[in-house]
């Protein structure tokens, strides 16, 4: 499936000066079908909302579905670079797909702006001047969960995540900050939906808490089965397992769970308030973490377009690095490896009327940078 949309960067709307000499063509490859489609749909919708709000034809967006398959993502990226002649690529949700695509497209002189996946391999020695992550480095929200576990006094966590790059980064991040012992550590199959064996291991362990990273449908399945399992241990996790698109499917099983995120709908800044309102008006649903990241990614791109010509790679790179856009997170800046330095919050799952959602209850980490930037030589 391919959708081509025209829109663009209005310098006055962005509050910056400058002019774009050449139109910019963007290839947005994301997951729009199968498992995890909700995540890609939210990134796409957030991105396209920002594009729509600016309103002329300096920007062309070509959208394709990677079906959460690395080989499909590579084929689409090759087509976009070689046939579509895109200038910038974005959209990938999953770290294994990002690892298959990003090094190739940046080596060909294209810019890649990640609205989600932030594998450690691309933050350290594998960093690249043309690669910018607008969301987080994979470990970050898990590091914050480890810090929160210490605050709660957990001494023996049982931890689990899928066996792919983001899952490995997740458990690495949690263990980097968590000061207690582990009751168990499991890597599950990516896309797994039956967690009976893992729940049996948790039940048999001497754990005092559970940390898990299971995005999309994996998290829905785990939380429902966890509630029915009789395991009565406090749960902590990253936002990916407790985000807006997941909570309605999970229901009461998620109530009260603490999770970590760099964004929430109740962040008190003008950009975020306007984003939440306009997203609901446009799509008829509350935005998710993924939608906010898509929105910020588009606005970063638009801010660079208003300052520099994409054909002048050095100038365009400098404009991206400046990060001069109004983020839904409030303050935003890139570290030296083009990954965000940002606050990470603790959220609690609550129910507002008939809607399950999150509210911020504290800050886990302040102005937090990733652990790999010193290995990046740019």
Image: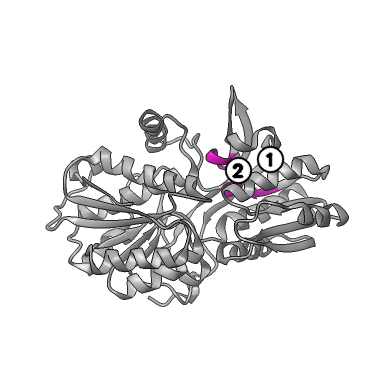
User: Answer yes or no: do the residues labelled 2 and 1 have beta carbons within 8 Å?
Assistant: yes
362 to 323, vertically: above or below = above
Whether residue 238 is visible to the viewer of this picture, yes or no, is no
Question: What residue range appears in magenta?
Answer: 236-246
Residue identifier under label 1: 257
Q: Nearer the viewer, residue 283 or 189?
A: 189
Most extreme residue toward the top is: 353
Magenta highlight on residue 245: yes
The answer to which quarter of the image holds residue 29 is: bottom left
The location of residue 131, given as percent across then percent down, is 37, 66
The dot on residue 316 is: none
**Within 10 angstroms of label 1, few (less than 14), some, or many (20 or more) residues?**
some
The location of residue 138, given as percent across then percent down, is 54, 60
* Left or right of residue 171, residue 45 in this image: left
The answer to which quarter of the image holds residue 207 is: bottom right
**Element assignment for label 1:** loop
User: Which quadrant would the C terminus be assigned to in this image?
Assistant: bottom left
Q: Nearer the viewer, residue 317 or 255?
A: 255
Comes first in the chain, label 2 or label 1: 2
Residue identifier under label 2: 242
Q: Nearer the viewer, residue 210 or 344?
A: 210
* Left or right of residue 69, residue 258 in this image: right
The answer to which quarter of the image holds residue 188 is: bottom right
Residue drawn at x 43%, y 44% is 42
Q: Nearer the viewer, mark 2 or mark 1?
A: 2
Residue drawn at x 72%, y 49% is 151
224 to 277, vertically: above or below = below
**Element assignment for label 2:** loop
The location of residue 58, given as percent across then percent down, is 17, 50
């Amino acid at each position: 499936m391919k959708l081509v949309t025209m829109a663009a960067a209005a310098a006055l709307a962005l509050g910056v000066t400058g002019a774009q000499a050449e139109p910019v063509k963007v290839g947005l490859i994301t997951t729009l079908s199968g498992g995890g489609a909700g995540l890609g749909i939210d990134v796409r919708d957030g991105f396209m909302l920002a594009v729509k709000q600016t309103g002329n034809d300096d920007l062309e967006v070509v959208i394709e579905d990677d079906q959460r398959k690395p080989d499909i993502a590579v084929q689409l990226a090759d087509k976009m670079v070689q046939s579509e002649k895109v200038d910038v690529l974005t959209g990938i949700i999953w770290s294994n797909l990002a690892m298959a695509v990003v090094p190739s497209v940046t080596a060909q002189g294209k810019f890649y702006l990640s609205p989600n996946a932030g594998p450690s391999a691309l933050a350290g020695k594998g960093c690249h001047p043309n690669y910018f992550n607008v969301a987080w480095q994979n470990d970050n929200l898990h590091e914050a969960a480890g810090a929160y576990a210490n605050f709660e006094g957990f001494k023996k966590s049982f931890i689990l995540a899928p066996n792919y790059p983001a899952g490995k980064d997740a458990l690495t991040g949690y263990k980097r900050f968590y000061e207690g012992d582990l009751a168990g550590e499991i890597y599950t199959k990516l896309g797994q939906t039956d967690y009976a064996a893992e729940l049996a291991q948790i039940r048999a362990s001497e754990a005092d808490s559970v940390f898990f990273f299971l995005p999309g449908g994996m998290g829905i399945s785990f939380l429902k089965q966890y509630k029915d399992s009789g395991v009565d241990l406090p749960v902590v996790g990253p936002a990916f397992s407790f985000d807006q698109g997941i909570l309605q499917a999970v229901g009461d099983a998620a109530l009260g769970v603490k999770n970590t995120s760099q964004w929430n709908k109740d962040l008190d800044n003008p950009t975020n308030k306007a984003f939440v309102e306009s997203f609901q008006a446009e799509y008829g649903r509350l935005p998710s973490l993924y939608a906010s990241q898509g929105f910020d990614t588009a606005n970063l791109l638009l801010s660079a377009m208003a300052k520099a010509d994409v054909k002048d790679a050095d100038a365009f790179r400098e404009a991206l690095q400046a990060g001069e856009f109004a983020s839904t997170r409030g303050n935003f800046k890139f570290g030296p490896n083009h990954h965000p330095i940002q606050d990470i919050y603790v959220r609690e799952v609550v129910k507002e009327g008939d809607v399950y959602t999150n509210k911020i209850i504290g800050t886990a980490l302040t102005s937090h940078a990733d652990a790999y930037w010193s290995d990046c030589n740019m």
